[in-house]
Each structure stands twice: as structure tokens, then as C-alpha cells.
Image (cartoon, helix red, strand yellow):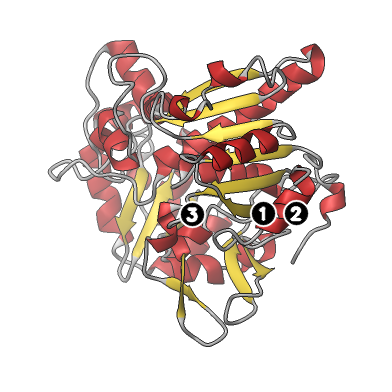
Amino acid sequence: MVSDEQNSALLGLKVLDLSRILAGPSATQLLGDLGADVVKVERPDAGDDTRKWGPPYVRDASGSETNESAYYLCANRNKRSIAIDLSSADGRALIFDLLANADVLVENYKVGGLAQYGLSYEQLKSRFPRLIYCSITGFGQTGPYASRPGYDFLIQGMGGIMSLTGAPDGQPMKVGVGIADVMTGMYAVVGILAALRHRDQCGEGQHIDISLLDTQISWLVNGAANYLTDGQLPKRLGNGHPNIVPYQVFETSDDSMILAVGNDRQFAKFCQIAGLDHLIGDPMFSTNPQRVINRDAVCEHISVALKTRSRSDWLRALEAADVPCGPVNNLQQVFDDPHVRARGASVEVPCAWAQSGNVTLLANPLKLSGTPVAYRRPPPRLDEHRDDVLNTWTKR
């Protein structure tokens, strides 16, 4: 389904995207989903690195693999591509022509990397005083690590999330997707929208300095708050929760399920259904603080009980009693789920160069009643929109 772009929240906003990989492109894709006109500037030789981060790759009408990987597809819809060599005088001149029409510039070069082309914020701010200039880096524009390159995996390690993730007796574990990149992209969009609001009121642009490490640390949430409150290093709990018990994966007679008891009332309901009534009045287990202290003991009682019935039996019984629970789904089960289908978690976007005439993408989760998300363009091929961009953004 392709939505009407004329009713988009950011219609008319022009974004010049000098970013690549995931954090920057995910930010500009989100702006594009909301209606912004995003021009993706790429290297003429190969374009965005992620185009070749495969397999799998999209297949063309002949069934042959293209140079567009599934990874590239995940963060580049609703953009037009133009290839520009920043190292050439003509390329830099073209960038300045594009900037004359841009509201926002997003870049993720190393700190100082664009200065050699005359494209740093300090070099542009007087010429383009209304420009919102968003710099996404691994470690920020200041500090002793500012010059280091940043990658999601390194940031997950340095930023603490891996110390909280994984089995107690196993290795520290990263999240299975580039979550530090994605969250940085989301924070970048928040910063851009705030800067645009300020510009609407005051007429001036500004520089946004956002880093993967800063963002990663910011979303440690209660894990960090626990440490900052009592100074105790949290231990890895696998699928357990540091502050709530029971709140983890358990095995049933045939499959895994999640039991996510959020309060003492829910715990009592669970115990009644599971034949564990004797735990309800036991002072070791009757309140959540005591269950946290006696985590191993209460979880052992629950583990034994849950293995007596199938997962489907438990889910039906617990859901009927409003005890929070759920399956552990693989991706096929996720996208086959009737609720996920009803909510439109994936979307078919027309794509002339793909074998089927469409590419299937993750949908934007925002449900805006007045200015819905618009799926206007599939991820572009390298330099696909050169003439179109030159005709609409410059006088060339």
C-alpha cells in the first residue's frame, strides 16, 4: 500500500543525506516516511557500503542478483539517489547548489572529515544560516575518543548493554540487530524536529552533535539507574529481569514461553492457575521485592509447574486470566501472526527494478490519523535520480 504524500507531516522539507550504513540512513528514512524530500548523496564508485552487505540480494526482472542487498533495503526507502564525487571541484559545487535548497543536512563522516571539502558546519553556517546540520558519529564531536570510528558492535560493548545481556555463565552478548545505530537514528530525528521547531520560531539553524556512545548509554534506562542508585554492578540474568520476578522465559512440555508477571495480583492469579497456591501466602514469595531476593527458589517452583502442560494450554489459560504471557516467535511466526498482519507490520512497495515488481519492507510503526506515513519510493539504485534531483533542487 502506498499512501498519499500530499497529506504528509513533513511535506516540503528538503533533506540532504550525506550518511551511509545504518544510523544516518535510518534517520533520513524516517524523515522521508513522514513526507520529507530526501536526496541521498553517494560515492560514484560503489555508493552506500550496505548495498553489498549480503546475501541476500534483491533479484531483477531476469532473476539475477542486483547490487542491492536486503540490508540496504531496510533503511533507504523514500529517497532519491545522486552520485557525487566530493573530492572534485564540480562535485563540491553541486553540493553547494543542493544546499541552497536544503533545510537539513545529515552526515556521518569522521569528526572533521567534511572540512577538507568546505562542508563542515562552521564553514557552512554563515552561508546557510537556516540550515539544520546533523552530525552522527561514534563518539561525538568532543572528548578524547572523538577521532575514533564507531561501529554498532563496538558501541554495544563500550556502552554497557553487553554487560547486561547474555546468560549468567556465558559471554557478554550483543543485541541481535544494530540497535545502537537504530536508536541513534531515532534520537537524530527527534533532534532535527526540535531544531526545525526552533528555526520556525527564531529563524536560525543549528548544529546537532549526536553519537552512538551517548545514545547507547542513554537507553540503559533502569539498568543504569540501578547502578547509579546503589553503586552495585548488575549481573547478567539471561532472560530474567533485574527488578521483577517472574519475568523471563520458561520451558513448557513442548516449547518456550514468556511469563511476565508485573505485580503481586498477577502473581497470585498465576499461582492459582498453576496449582502453586501455597506460594501466595509464603512471605518469601508473596511480594515482588521478596521474589527478587529469592529469585532462584521461586523460579524453580514455576519451572516444574510449567513443564506439566503444553505452551498452547498455558497461553490459553493465562491469557484468559489476564496474566501477561506470550510465545517466543521466530520471524516466520511474527509475520504470520494475525495481529501483526492486522497492524500492517510489513508493506509492499512498488519497485520497477525488482523481479516481482515490488519489494517487501518493514512498515513504519507510526499511526498518524491526520498525516499518515507515505511509502512513495522504494530504496533507490545508485545515481537513479540524478536528472530528477538536478531538475527539482538546482537550476542546472
Marking on residue 177? none
**Mark 3 or mark 2: which is in front?**
3
Label 1: how many Cα within 10 Å (few below 14, some 14–19, many 20+): many
Label whose residue precedes the other's in the sequence (3 or 2) = 3
Label whose residue precedes the other's in the sequence (2 or 1) = 1
Q: Are marks 2 and 1 in contact (CB under 8 Å)?
A: yes
Residue, far front = 89
Residue, far bottom = 62
Label 3: how many Cα within 10 Å (few below 14, some 14–19, many 20+): some
**Mark 1 or mark 3: which is in front?**
3
Residue 66 spot, x, y in % from top left: 47, 73
Give the residue drawn at x 29%, y 20%: 145
Q: Amino acid at mark 1?
A: Asn
Marking on residue 44? 3
Q: Secondary structure at mark 2?
A: loop
Give the residue drawn at x 29%, y 63%: 307
Residue 353 spot, x, y in % from top left: 61, 75
Give the residue drawn at x 23%, y 17%: 232
Residue, far left = 169
Residue 85 spot, x, y in % from top left: 50, 46
Marking on residue 78? 1
- Height in image: 83 above or below 289? below
Residue 78 spot, x, y in % from top left: 67, 54
Marking on residue 374? 2
Structural distance between the alpha carbons of marks 1 and 3: 20 Å
